[in-house]
Structures are given as C-alpha cells and as structure tokens.
Amino acid sequence: MEGTAIRRRLTWQLGEVVETRTETRRARSLTFAVPEWPGHRPGQHVDVRLTAEDGYRAERSYSIASPPEEQPKVTITVERLDDGEVSPYLVDEVRVGDHVELRGPIGGYFAWEATMGGPLLLVGGGSGIVPLMAMVRHRRSVASTVPTRLLYSSRSQDEVIYRDELDDLARRDGGLTVIYALTRTQPPGWTGYGRRVDGELLRDVAWPARENPLAYICGPTQFVETVATGLVTLGYDPTRVRTERFGPTGGG
Amino acid sequence: MPENFISRAFRGRRQTSEVAARLPPGQYLEQGFPVLSAGPTPRTPLDRWDFTLVGSVAQPKRWTWDELRSLPHESVTVDIHCVTKWSKLDTHWEGVSVDTLLAQVVSDAGYVVAFCDGGYTTNLPRDAVTGGKAWIAYAYDGAPIPPEHGGPARLLVPHLYFWKSAKWVRGLRLVEKDEPGFWESLGYHNLGDPWKEQRYAGD
C-alpha cells in the first residue's frame, strides 16, 4: 500500500478562519490559516475540537477540500446536520477572524496523488464529494493529465457543492469529465442522469475494468456499498477500489 | 496551544452524567451504527469460510464455519468506540471467546495479527485479546452480522477503538514480535485505548 506513515505526534493547532464561502443551503466552506500545518495528501481529513466556556469539548473529523498546494491554508466543507452538535456551529456561527482548534492530517489510505496515476474514477454522493474535490483540485494544481471521471450524485441541482468550479474545470480540461446524477428533482431541460447510481449507470460511466482503473468512492453507507459492489461486479480489482463512508445505517 | 482556548459562542450539547461517564474523551453518542471500511465489502460463502490460528504455534489450528459455531459461545453487551469519534452504548453480540480458541494451540507468542478477507490486518498484544476481553463474534442484536458490519464473523475487542475489531476476520497469526497492521501503518495508534484517547501515533 502507498501512504506515508505519520510518525510525528499530531498536536492541536489554532487555525484562523480567513475565508468562508456558502456552497449550498446546507453546506459552507471554511478556510483556515494554519501556520504549522505539516501538509496533507488529497483525501485526508482533519480533526476539529471546540471548547465551550465551561470547558466542555466536542471533537469531529472533516474531510479536507483543499489541495496540498494551498498549504498553509486548509479548507473544509461542512454540511449542516439539523440535529448536529458541531456542524450547525461551523456552518452558521463561525466567522472570519475566529479561531478553531485543528489537528491532522488524519488517514492516508483514502488518498490520491497524481503520481499514483489512473485512469481515475471518483464517485461521490452528497457531501462525499469533499475529499474527492481535494483530489480534483490537486490534479489541476499540478497540471496532471491523468484521465479522470467524476460521478457525483446529489438530490437536486441546488445541493450540488462546487458546481461552478467543477463545470469550469471540466470545460477547460479535456482529461476531466464530470457526470451528475440528480436523484430527486431535476431542472427543466436536464440532460444528465435523473436517478440513483446503480450497476447499469456505472456500466455507462465507469472506465472499463480492463484499463485497470483506480477508484475512490465517498458518500453515505448504502451509496458506497452499491457503488463498490457494482464496480467489483464490473471486474474492478477490489484492491484498487477505496472507500470512505459516513452516516448511520438502518441496522443499528 | 493555549490551555484556556475557548471557541467563541460554542455551547455544545451535554449528555446526562450517566451517559457522559461512559463516553471516552472526544467521543459523542451515536444511535445508529455507522460503517467504516477502506474498500469493497468482501463476501465469502460459508462453505468456503474457515478460521485459523497460524504463525508461531506448535500446531496450526483450523475451524470450519460449522465447527466454530459448535464451540461454546457467549453473549456480551458492550459499549463500542470508533476512532472517528462516535460511541455506541449497550451493543449486543454473540460469539466465541478468543480464550476458547487460543486454549487449543501451544504458543509463547506475545502478539497477534488479525487477518481478514479483503486484506485488512490489525495487530494486538496477546493480553489485549485474552482474559475475557475479545471474541470472534458472529451475531449482532440477535441476528447474523450483516456483511457491511463485518459478517460472517468479526473480531470484537470493545476495550480498544473499533478499528481493532477487525471485520471479515479469518484468523489470528501469532507473532513473537509486534508488527503494525493496516491503520497502524497509516499513523493510527499502535494500541488504541479510547480512555487514554490513543487515536494516533504519539498520543
């Protein structure tokens, strides 16, 4: 397996919020200046720690959306969970000039660098796009020509995060194809997919298995299960299918 | 890092003291059962499934699915803690104690490496999986463990972060010398005691 072991100790650092950006009704990006940031690989995440006045603390992990090339700036994109403890604070409360405790980077298997090659298949569901965006941005930053297909499933067009940037990147770069699937509502004249990702859709969109693609899938559990199983069924080498899942299942 | 850092306007959500006392530092209560896996869910038919004890043992040992299921088993109710910050309380499992399995081999090895379908591994000191602290679990909440949660069988080591409770486990390799497993090679802590918040190397 690739991946550099993290040998040094990960310590908490203060990141200053230098930019915020509303992505959708529920998602916001926060860019932190982190002077001592050790660097990260596209796809890794960062731990966030919040402390209340009485000393009560809450910690969460968020995927990093920015490429390593923007170091020492680190951007996360957070989706508000209505019953969440931390995400409403990060999406609605935090403002430029605030500080947040961070430590990272965390992970290292769900990571892609241009040197790992391709062809690359990225499949994201909902806010599962975030770590994949770090890969896409890294690919652009280093002017990589690795053939890349991004399949991005959202409920509706206004829930698509990074839409303008993705469309712009795809327009400028013949090596990058972005395919959307809108599962609940589609705008008038929609020419993309208007349904959930399944085996048939993957057969249309995914690189043929004989090209020995490298695949990264991130999204809700059931979405990732469907896509990962679908790709293996299409003949993908399971060791070249990397997954990251979030959200509870019905089983618990 | 200043010790007295306060996040402006953050209040948080307190648990009852009873629940809070069962949550290790940095963990939050989860009612669902999130799934974390690095790759596709492997599916091995039960008639081709086995569980083995190999490595530094006088005589390796192998159980088929039916043989494992006929061993004495236990029901346990435990709290589980994932390094990604969620904890789930009072989870019900059934399985065979690792003590029961290790009693059938002769070995002085001080460490084990759990190995799994899909290639996952995780390393543990032998004393972390003996003395009634670990099981090869095959039922969750009264039903076979669903594949995405590690079925047909997973290691259950609830006193450590849940990445040590390897899904799709197929055996233990006994080793004289500790060797890092999958996540342990990627910067996660070698032992992973949630009560000491041993998430990452150096914690």
Image: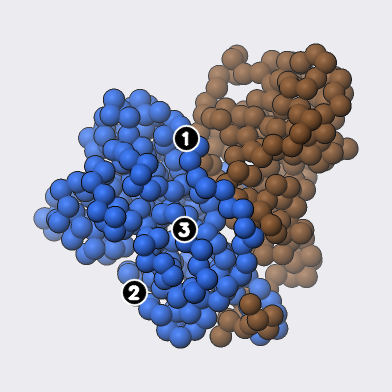
Chain colours: A blue, B brown
Name the disc covering residue A22, or none. Answer: 2
The circle on residue B40 is: 1
- On residue B119, the disc is none
Residue drawn at the location 74% of the way across and 70% of the way down: B16
- SS at mark 2 in the image: strand
Residue type indicated by callout 1:
Pro
Q: Earlier in the sequence, mark 3 or mark 2?
A: 2
Q: Are marks 1 and 2 in contact (CB under 8 Å)?
A: no
Amino acid at circle 3: His
Give coordinates of residue A5: x percent, y percent.
57, 48
Q: Quadrant of residue A78?
A: bottom left
Residue in the picture at 49% in, 73% down: A34
Asked if residue B131 is positioned above or below residue A181 in the image, the reply reads above
Q: Are callouts 1 and 3 both on one chain?
A: no
Q: Chain of mark 2?
A: A
Residue at image position (52%, 26%) is B43
Write down the residue under mark 3.
Answer: A40
Q: Are marks 1 and 3 in contact (CB under 8 Å)?
A: no
Residue A115 visible in this rendered orientation of the protein: yes
